[in-house]
Amino acid sequence: MVGRVLIVEDEPNIVESLQFLLEREGLEISVQSDGGRALESVRASEPDVVILDVMLPNRSGFDILRDIHSLPGKRPKVMILTAKGQARDRDTAEEIGVDIFMTKPFSNKEIIANILGLLA
Amino acid sequence: MRKSLSGTRIREQRRQAKLTQKALAEQSGISASYLNLIEHNRRAVAGKVLLAIARVLDVPASSLSDGVDSAKISDLHEAAAHHPGIGAEVAGIEEYAGRFPGWAGMVAALYRQTRDQEAVITALSDRLTHDPFLAESLHGMLSNITAVRSTSNILTSIDDIDPEKQARFHEIIHEESRRLTETAQSLVTYFDKKADPNAGIATPQEELDSFLERHNYSFPQLDDLGEAPTNPVETAYLVNRILVNDGALENPEANRLVTEFLQSYARDSEALPHSDFAKKARQSHYNPSEIAHAFGTSMHMVFRRLAYQDAARTAAPPMGLIVANAAGRAIFRRPIADFAFPRHGNACPRWPLFQAFATPETPVAALLELPGRHKFIGLAIAEAQDARAFGQPPELNAAMLILHYEQRALLSGWLPDLGATRPIGITCRICPRKACNARTEPQILGDEAEG
């Protein structure tokens, strides 16, 4: 499958495993660890899917999700991938308009299936 | 009006001493009919007569006089309101407190204990929900576990990983496991500390209040700072030594509040050196305005210095102090006998403290009366806390100095006409003034006439 995925995550070891898994599926991966520069990366890499952490330096994942929704034209699909798994966090993400909400720790199989589902 | 209870207490003590009214009256040098009126709370008793009766009954005069029970009675009212289903006889609370002061004290103490424990539970719940250390630790652990789980799953489920990448994944597992262990160990240490029953748990503001009470609201180590040139390092050392010697502050936020208080105390001492300040205070008859003018300081600084002074070193009258921000939240509290500050909820909006916000930088003086008939002089002023800048509203705090009305002679020569007595309360919830148009919450007291 062909597709571009942007991983916005500040834990390098999590990024490394995600990148390994998704590249094996033939996806093109870019990475941003700074929440404050996430939107810039979205504009630059034009991903089909953004994997977005919530607790990020400089800007929260929820704010970045709002930013993505305010972009003109076709917007990427967004998967929130967070340790903040409380109901209110899920509600917040769904109110803003997330495509998939996943909590850490995740299953490799499930995350690959979800990303491929968003790209289908 | 809350009745005087002195008579009830005298009657009870006389009965315990197995004395007749006639015998007590004779030995106290008053007529039996006068004692009868006193015992039925129809005549006030104070001064020499009270002392004489106390001497005959062989009890401290303070145990017979009014005022000692006001806090206890407030607590009993609150306790009754807190448990309406029990049907406590609210109308008889004062009689109960007067006749059985020990039992009343025990009920009030048990109620306070329950209320304080509820506050502890709330504080603990808040801590679990909002504690930044816990939140950060748990978030970190989940991230470590995520990395370990994902990486180990890759290693076990995928065969064709090149050796270099395999080595890297092993390294990640090792690194994340080590971080996970460190976080878990720091959490264990954290909970061990919090589980210490001797540490006590209170809100940071309550810890500050307890700290000040432990030190009797004065710090002689800092009092003399202004007597000779000092430097910030020396001041910081003195502040730190007080904290270390106290050794009872567990909560970092309480530690911060206490440190800020002590630093403020030190600055006040430097600007108002003890000996010059005490001399000027006496000379000016404790006129805060004149003292502030003489030393070129703010009135708030003078208020603090007057309230937080070592009573043993000065002959100054006792003064209470409350400082609040514009939202009405108490920042500093220095209690004074018979004038309780609310532990929870808002203070009475009729306090001059709040009036002062309407006219910043303008002193306000008022004669205040609490429902128990205790009278006080309240001196208040709202002042800007920061350097003023164009286009920015000032951050105002208001401070109110409180003195017993009986001390008014010490303030001679400058105290303005205080006008009519202003009826005030402590907080609406325990205030019996039915007709008060400043009421913001319904009272939880029983059916009681306005005081």
Image (cartoon, helix red, strand yellow):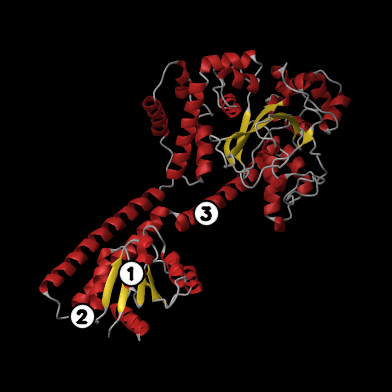
Residue with the mark numbered 3: B121
At a point 59% along the width and 49% down the height, the residue shown is B115
Q: Position of residue B301 (x, y in %)?
A: 56, 27
Q: Earlier in the sequence, mark 2 or mark 3?
A: 3
Q: Nearer the viewer, residue A98 or A83?
A: A98
At a point 36% along the width and 70% down the height, the residue shown is A43
At a point 76% along the width and 36% down the height, the residue shown is B372
Q: Is residue B100 left or right of residue A70?
A: right
Of all chains, the one bearing label 3 is B
Q: Residues within 10 Å of mark 1 (few under 14, many from 20)?
A: few
Query: Mark 1 to mark 3: distance in Å?
Result: 50 Å
Query: Mark 2 to mark 1: distance in Å?
Result: 34 Å
Secondary structure of residue under mark 3: helix
Q: Please state which of the two labelled residues, at mark 1 or mark 3, is closer to the viewer.
A: 1
Q: Which image quarter is the N terminus of chain B in?
A: top right
Residue with the mark numbered 1: A44
Q: Looking at this rendering, what residue extends furthest in the right direction?
A: B33
Residue with the mark numbered 2: B157
Of all chains, the one bearing label 1 is A
Of all chains, the one bearing label 2 is B
Q: Nearer the viewer, residue B108 or B226?
A: B226
